[in-house]
């Protein structure tokens, strides 16, 4: 079992060291399993519907059941890691996720599958913020940007491999294998984490759980998420949607009041006193809204308008993964040296440019001349943006709040993506019937993808005006030299 003795005397693990690589491998595998299941299920939906039935609504909830619990509980997951140990909650989340995956693979009907997917979301809420918090608390300040860049690039492989591997597994074996495959992957990750990942926590945090904050936070995020998911199916003014939205708003307001007045809040509101933290999360919201709408609509566009198979549509986005893998560590390292303002401003502008090129893809487009240029520009912008943005959010919070900071940023990104998926088709005038008519869908797609480009551009402009030029990502000098997260400095920082 790893301890803080594996760390470098300068205040953490070195990126190039063997202990550092083991920590990175554990966090990439853990978050990658969660990302894999988020993408692979899309390809399997037709086979699931054929085998289990359940109708369109049931199949939608196979996807949305996971997102609902994940978005609702991710703040709690980050807080629990800070309180009781980030490695501990990461491993618990992995074990929970694997158990729910087994239930998914054995589900006899759609109802059980939806319930199991909701349980998977709980596991994802425990392990996802933990993976980033472990990196932030384990690596030396000067190596964190590079480590987060590598995490972004390597983790992106799971997102791209999902449709490819899922399509092959569904055709060759069964849709159930996409869930059962998680079991050996999780087992390996747990072994690596137990042996090589140092434990860290916030020693100043009370061990008592903030029950009131947890309930109100889950109700707030859950209500808003449910309303976004179901608004298109039930109508935005239907009583269940209005009630869910009201519960969400009241829950969020109540959560803020409870955290402000509580003695031991799960989300210390002083984390938002950092102008950089608030600004980076605002940029996260706009950029990830653009990404959520793009990943949802573009792959569908390729299938409906260009006649791609699910496997071909997934493969069409593979260059994005290659660019993320190659460039994300370099982008994180660059932002570490010059500050995050430039990459966080330029990256979203490149994303916007790529989306505008994608908007021109129509039924007569070939892959090389029509699809690939936009995908490459989009991937280049994504590689420039993700690692510096993630590292900036984590660096803006005190190290002891690494889990909470990661949870907040993940919740912001998830809600932004859900909002985009719900709103962009409405803005574009896309209806359920348009998904069966290529010409109507293509017209709506162009409107929606241009709106997504506007969001990405807004993110770049926000970054330019809200992120200071001289804001380095390892600026917390008082915390720079320590023997473990939350421990006193080994020697004073020099100012």
Image (tube, grey):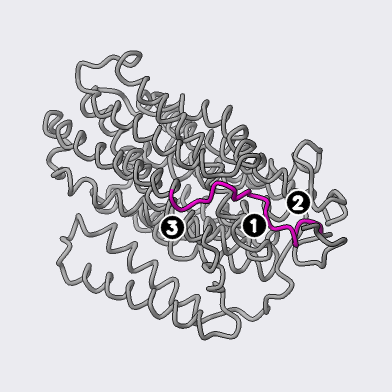
Q: Residues within 10 Å of mark 1 (few under 14, many from 20)?
A: many
Q: Secondary structure at mark 2?
A: loop
Q: Where does residue 485 sit, x and y in percent of width and height?
A: 75, 62
Nearest the eye: 293 or 493: 493
Residue stretch in magenta: 465-481
* Residue at 53% from the left image edge and 69% from the top image edge: 273
Quarter occupied by residue 85: bottom right
Q: Earlier in the sequence, mark 3 or mark 1?
A: 1
Q: Earlier in the sequence, mark 2 or mark 3?
A: 2
Mark 3 highlights which residue?
412
Q: Where does residue 188 sit, x and y in percent of width and height?
A: 69, 43
Nearest the eye: 425 or 386: 386
Q: Where does residue 385 sit, x and y in percent of width and height?
A: 49, 40
* Residue at 57% from the left image edge and 29% from the top image edge: 327
Whole-angstrom CA distance, mark 3 to mark 1, is 20 Å
Q: Nearer the viewer, mark 3 or mark 1?
A: 3
Whole-angstrom CA distance, mark 2 to mark 3, is 27 Å
Name the image quarter holding the N terminus.
bottom right
Mark 1 highlights which residue?
90
* Residue at 35% from the left image edge and 48% from the top image edge: 289
Q: Is residue 62 visible?
A: no
Q: Is residue 38 visible?
A: yes
Name the image quarter holding the C terminus.
bottom right
Pointer 1 with pointer 2, Cβ within 8 A: yes
Q: Earlier in the sequence, mark 1 or mark 2?
A: 1
Q: Residues within 10 Å of mark 3 (few under 14, many from 20)?
A: many
Mark 2 highlights which residue?
197
Q: In screen coordinates, is 27 left or right of 434?
A: right
């Amino acid at each position: 079992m790893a301890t803080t003795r594996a760390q470098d005397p300068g205040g953490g693990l070195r990126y190039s060291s063997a202990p550092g690589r083991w920590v990175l491998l554990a966090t990439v595998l853990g978050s990658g399993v969660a990302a894999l299941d988020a993408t692979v299920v899309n390809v399997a939906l037709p086979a699931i519907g054929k085998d289990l039935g359940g109708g369109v609504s049931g199949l939608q909830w196979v996807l949305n059941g996971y997102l609902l619990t994940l978005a609702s509980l991710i703040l709690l997951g980050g807080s629990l890691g800070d309180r009781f140990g980030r490695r501990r909650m990461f491993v618990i989340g992995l074990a929970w996720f694997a158990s729910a995956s087994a239930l998914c693979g054995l589900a006899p009907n759609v109802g059980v599958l939806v319930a199991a997917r909701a349980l998977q979301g709980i596991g994802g809420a425990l392990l996802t913020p933990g993976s980033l918090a472990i990196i932030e608390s384990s690596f030396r300040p000067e190596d964190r940007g590079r480590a987060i860049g590598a995490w972004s690039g390597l983790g992106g492989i799971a997102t791209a491999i999902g449709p490819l591997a899922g399509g092959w597994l569904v055709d060759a074996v069964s849709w159930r294998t996409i869930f059962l495959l998680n079991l050996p992957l999780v087992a390996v990750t747990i072994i690596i984490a137990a042996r090589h990942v140092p434990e860290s926590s916030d020693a100043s945090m009370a061990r008592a759980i903030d029950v009131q904050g947890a309930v109100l936070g889950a109700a707030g995020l859950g209500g808003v998420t449910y309303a976004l998911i179901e608004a298109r199916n039930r109508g935005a003014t239907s009583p269940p949607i209005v009630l869910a939205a009201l519960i969400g708003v009241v829950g969020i307001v109540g959560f803020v009041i409870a955290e402000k007045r509580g003695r031991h809040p799960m989300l210390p509101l002083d984390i938002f006193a950092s102008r950089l933290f608030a600004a980076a999360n605002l940029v996260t919201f706009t950029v990830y809204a653009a990404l959520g709408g793009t990943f949802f609509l573009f792959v569908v566009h390729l299938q409906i308008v260009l006649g791609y198979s699910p496997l071909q549509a997934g493969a069409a986005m593979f260059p994005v993964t290659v660019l993320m893998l190659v460039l994300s560590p370099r982008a994180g390292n660059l932002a570490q040296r010059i500050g995050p303002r430039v990459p966080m401003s330029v990256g979203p502008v490149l994303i916007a440019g790529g989306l505008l090129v994608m908007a021109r893809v129509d039924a007569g487009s070939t892959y090389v001349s029509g699809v690939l240029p936009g995908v490459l520009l989009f991937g280049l912008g994504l590689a420039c943006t993700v690692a510096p943005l993630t590292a900036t959010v984590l660096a803006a919070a005190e190290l002891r709040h690494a889990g909470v900071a990661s949870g907040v940023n993940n919740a912001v990104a998830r809600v932004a993506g859900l909002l985009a998926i719900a709103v962009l088709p409405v803005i574009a005038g896309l209806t359920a019937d348009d998904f069966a008519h290529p010409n109507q869908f293509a017209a709506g797609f162009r409107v929606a993808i241009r709106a997504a480009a506007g969001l990405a551009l807004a993110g770049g402009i926000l970054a330019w005006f809200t992120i200071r030029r001289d804001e380095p990502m390892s600026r917390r000098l008082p915390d720079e030299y320590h023997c473990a997260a939350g421990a006193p400095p080994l020697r004073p920082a020099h100012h």
